[in-house]
Image: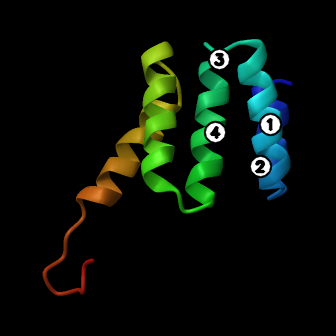
Amino acid sequence: MTDTEISEIIAKDDLSEARSAIARALAVNPDDDGAYYCLGRVLWKFDRRPEALSAFTAAVRLNPDSPARHALEMGRDVFDFFNPDLLNP
């Protein structure tokens, strides 16, 4: 399954099917940066943010030009956000 097909599944919010498709893609090619990027997107939607950042990092290690680079930067910005006027956990 291609990254585009997996992205279409994610867009339909069928996250369980997307996880299955990603697992199959990584079983065939464990160096598939696009699959790791998709995995990060799915994990982010499941509110598993640290795991998502790990998946984005894996994608960037495999392909420095991956769109996961932007997602990783944005994810880090979310974690680095602190506003003293708000209750921050």
Colour logic:
rainbow
Crowd rating for badge 1 (residues with CA inside 10 Å; few <14, some 14–19, many 20+): many
Label 1 amino acid? Ile
Is 8 on the left-hand or right-hand side of 65?
A: right
CA–CA distance between discs 4 and 3? 11 Å
Q: Residue 22, located in which quarter of the rendered image?
A: top right
Helix, strand or loop at disc 4? helix
Along the polypeptide, which appears first: circle 4 or circle 3?
Answer: 3
46 relative position to 63: left or right: right
The spot of residue 20 in percent (x, y) is 81, 39
Q: Earlier in the sequence, mark 4 or mark 2?
A: 2
- Residue underneath mark 3: 32
- Of mark 1 and mark 4, the one earlier in the sequence is 1
Residue matched to label 4: 39
Q: CA distance from mark 1 to mark 3?
A: 13 Å
The answer to the question of whether label 1 and label 4 lie on touching residues, with beta carbons closer than 8 A, is no
Q: Which three-letter amino acid code belongs to the residue tagged 3?
A: Asp
- Between marks 1 and 4, how big is the CA–CA gap? 9 Å
Q: Is residue 63 visible?
A: no
Check residue 29 in the rendering and tell me which mark sits there, or answer none. none
Residue to which mark 1 is pinned: 6
Alpha carbon of mark 4 to alpha carbon of mark 2: how far? 10 Å
